[in-house]
Amino acid sequence: MSNILLQAENISKYYYLGDQKIMVLGNVSLTVNRGEFVVIAGSSGSGKTTLLSVLSGLDRPSIGRIHMAGRDITDLTEDQLAPVRNTLTGFVFQAFHLIPSLNAIENVMFPAELKKDPEARNKAQSLLDQVGLQDRGKNFPEQLSGGEQQRIAICRALINDPEIVFADEPTGNLDSENSEGIIQLLVDLHKDRKITLVIATHSQSLASRADRIVRLHDGRIQEG
Amino acid sequence: MKDAMNIRFLIREILHSKSQAVVFILCVALSLVSIVAINSFRSDVQQSIASDARGLHGGDIIVHSHYDFSPALQQEIAALAKKTGIQVARTWEFYSVARRADGQDSLFSNIKAVEKGYPLYGTVELLSGREFSRVLQPGKVVVAPELLKRLGLALGDKLLLGDSVLEIVDVIGRESLRPVDFFNFGPRILVAAADLAQMDLVQKGSRVQYEALLKVADAGQINTLAAGLQARAVTGQERVATYATASSRVKRFFDNLLFFLSLVSVFTLLLAGIGMQSSLAAFLRRKEKSFAILRSLGATGSFLLRHYLVIVFILSFIGCAVGILSGLLLEKNFSTLFAGLLPDNIVLGGSFFDVLEGIGLGLVVVTFFTFLPLSKIKNVKPAAVFRKESDNGRQNRGTYVLIGCGIILLTGLVVRQLNDLRIGLYFLGGVLALIAVISVLIGILLLLLSRLQIASLPLRQAVRSLLRPGNATRPIVVTLASALSVLLTIYLMEYNLHATYIASYPADAPNLFCLDIQKNQQHDFRGLVGQDVELFPIIRARLTSINGERIHRESEMKKRGDSLAREFNLTYRPKLLSDEVLIKGDSLFGNVREKSGLVPVSLLDTVAEMGDMKMGDVLIFNVQGVPMKAEVSSIRSRTKSMLYPFFYFVFPEENLRAAPQTFFGALKVKKSEIAQLQNTIVNHFPNISTINVGETAAELEKILQKLSTIINFFASFSILAGALILVSSVLATRMARIKEAVYYKVLGADTRFVLLVFFLENFILALLSSGCAILVAQAGSWGLCRFLFDIDFDPSWPVSFAMLVMTVCLVVTLGLLSSVSILGQKPIRFLREQS
């Protein structure tokens, strides 16, 4: 088995605003190895989130190819991407994006239920125990604090034991105390579970704990 | 910003939520379209009747009676006829059988014998184009084209009417006195009054409408002359009216039909109003954040309210314009929908007044239904920029006062539309009760749903989505269920009435009725048709008072349905009929005679309910001029509902034996032999009228089908209101749906899963709506059949099932159409917006 889990080859991403072509990413190539903790850093508008979304298959590059676990996912349809997202990857977002009509444990178990895992509830409860939210399982997202919601989102990302977790500014909506807690949680998970982590962030604290920092400027890799 | 009206802001706000704005406009339009069409149609019908009132009644003064005029009245009419400037024409109208001269065929027909000069106003147009008064001479008849067709006759042929042989000289094209002819179960024959005696069809007790029409040259004299005639008329028996005050069957028919259609239209208006409110609330919900931002920038609550009032005004104006125009356009095409039912002189088309009335209606409706959502704008606080504040639902006193005013305004509108305070209030109460019952049912079902432990993931997600915060599940289901329940109830009533009275006419029931059999013809009639024929004596009389309280003709005639002021057929017999049971009293006549010395009378339960009459009540009848005091000795009920003779009032034979009477015969004849027997009877007894019951029922069914098509057409507008509320809710929850779809996809769900969740959500919504509608409609129809019509109830489940399937298809299609576009898109676009 190859050690390379994720590979981006010469990817560019641009949009059209009227007649104007806006280049967001320009000819970016990147490789992420299994078990690696990579932080994508850069100032606002540098293209961090775009790069993360293209790498994870949430968006499609205008030019270039993306390979994940040895498979070219660039041209996969949404339905072809569904099993990839369900089992191979996990996502954590700045705005948490929990399903508002489901309570905490239901949010966590949802991806496992999608793949018909009979142990979904037990696994979800176990993850909630691990992040200290064992008593908050029946609360709905709106009844939880930002830090609690983000921990739920991390549990949800992990329930199907993905090989790689993508996180976009996971501490962006949190205060410093909660941010530190989330950073520690991610770092611990990476160490304990040997999960590959790709995180787009402004946070120096988070970046400082990464194996590698990929720094972007105007859509191009400056360093890393 | 605080004072000026920002036009750009107005335009941007409308364009930003254009889908909801369109739904709001459509709701306003829908609330008006059927009601404007009905009101405009009503004014056209009234116009057509009022503009030709003299032509419709045939004279300035109309004297009417079911008996030959009393001597005093006859003298007065004769005296007036001699005066200069006054012209009189008498008419006799009745049903009898017209026969071919060879006796081979006969037809139950409407015969009108008229004196020279008839009609004094209006026209009888003949197909030949000749003048009616020149053509209708003694010994001649003019007939409706249908008579020629059905009897296989032609101009110049002979026609037997009673004992007369008359020549058919022309064919009727149009009669202004008979602008519609679907009320009549036989073709018209006009005959000269001079032939009446020879025909010998008007005999004692015969059912004849006697009329004297007067044309008065000096219009100022009309009321005085009418009053003079009224003074000589027998009260309660002879009626004198002027062309301006006289009622007509045409007017009564349209009054009743338009009243019912108004009920349906008001129902649609209320549902569309709910749609207006829910779409505006959804429209404003999307703007809450903007309101908070504007407030934090210094905009006052009244700045926002003022702008949104203008927005609602603009949208309402467009909606009103669309609704009024569509209503008038619809009315213009009523000639297709009402084909065969319209007066032939009606001109369909909207007037300026119709437009004004529509605008007034629109203003009331929009004000009432938009007030609550708009009133909340002022309460949005700048702090809402930071957090979502939930509405505590409390209203201040001013709001309650305004809601009260709105309810009074709406009640006024409904009462005005229905032109009846009592029924208006009952109707509003009924609609509110219907909505309350359905709301409670839905509330219980949604609560049960929320507590269900559902194993299937898509089904659980669908239920959770249905219960998502801000979802308009409840108003959608309540509105759809209310509309569907009304439609299904109308259908079920129609179906059960049809099944009882027409389709399931019992095989052993009489199918040939014979009317106007004279007392001295009884023996020979039995000899001709068989000794076992049942003959019912009929004595015509009026009820004049109940326990000393007079029956007021005017108020009784205003009532919808049967009237106590009409003429009744009394009968006498010693025992109950085979389809009757006693529900009050030990025997038909009890011991009234011994106790009070009054004449005992047995009532049928339906008439007892009409007049709130009880055992022991004292009734006074006018039996063709002779008063008769009677006491209620028993109350009967019928065990079967069918076209079989029944009598409201039954007396002992000794009390009515001597009264002028005819007999009614009910025969059971093989279908193939009916026509032959009819010929035999009328050839032997020309004065006896025969009615083929099966044929009459079929004619009745045709009219009922036509009417039910019209009612269903208008009722279907209420379904549209339900659909608009559904669309409004789909639009209002579109963001929530997109959000869910994107989350499902990010977490690894495929298209099939997302579609399945959306499908199930809409499927449950449709099931709840149609399920509740079926429950309420079945229960309501059962109650109506059981307690109001007193007939058996058949639930007709296949139709309920069909409605359920159609609702599911409609709701699922609408729901899925709005969500399909989300499926193929990459999730990142939405996630970025959310972040």
Image: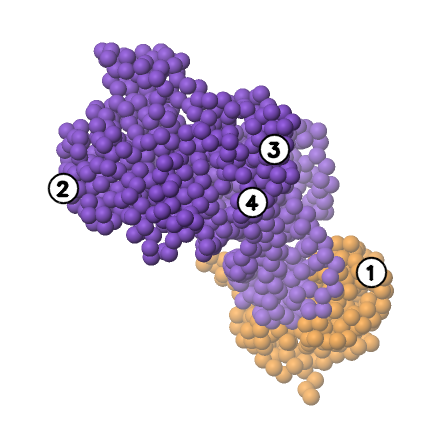
Point out the frontmost of discs 2 and 4.
4
Q: Distance between the residues labelled 2 and 1?
A: 100 Å
Q: Identify the residue under disc 1.
A: A136
Q: Residue at x 46, y 55 (%)?
A: B508
Residue situated in front as seen by the camera: B674 or B244: B674
Chain depicted in orange: A
Secondary structure, mark 2, is loop
The chain to which mark 4 is attached is B
Q: Residues within 10 Å of mark 4 (few under 14, many from 20)?
A: some
Residue at the disc numbered 4: B580
Labels 3 and 1 in the same subunit:
no
Whole-angstrom CA distance, mark 3 to mark 1, is 77 Å
Q: Distance between the residues labelled 3 and 4?
A: 15 Å
Chain of the residue under the numbered disc 1 shown in the image: A
* Above or below for B708 versus B297: below
Q: In this view, does B800 lie to the left or right of B527?
A: right
Which residue is under mark 2? B156
Picture residue at 68% right of the left edge, 86% below the top: A2
Q: In x, y percent, where is residue A221?
A: 63, 70
Disc 2 vs disc 3: which is toward the camera? 3
* B22 up-or-down from A1: above or below: above
Q: Which amino acid does label 2 sit on?
A: Gly
Callout 3, which amino acid?
A: Ser
Q: Earlier in the sequence, mark 2 or mark 4?
A: 2
* Image-quadrant location for residue B124: top left
What color is chain B drawn in?
A: purple
Q: Earlier in the sequence, mark 2 or mark 3?
A: 2
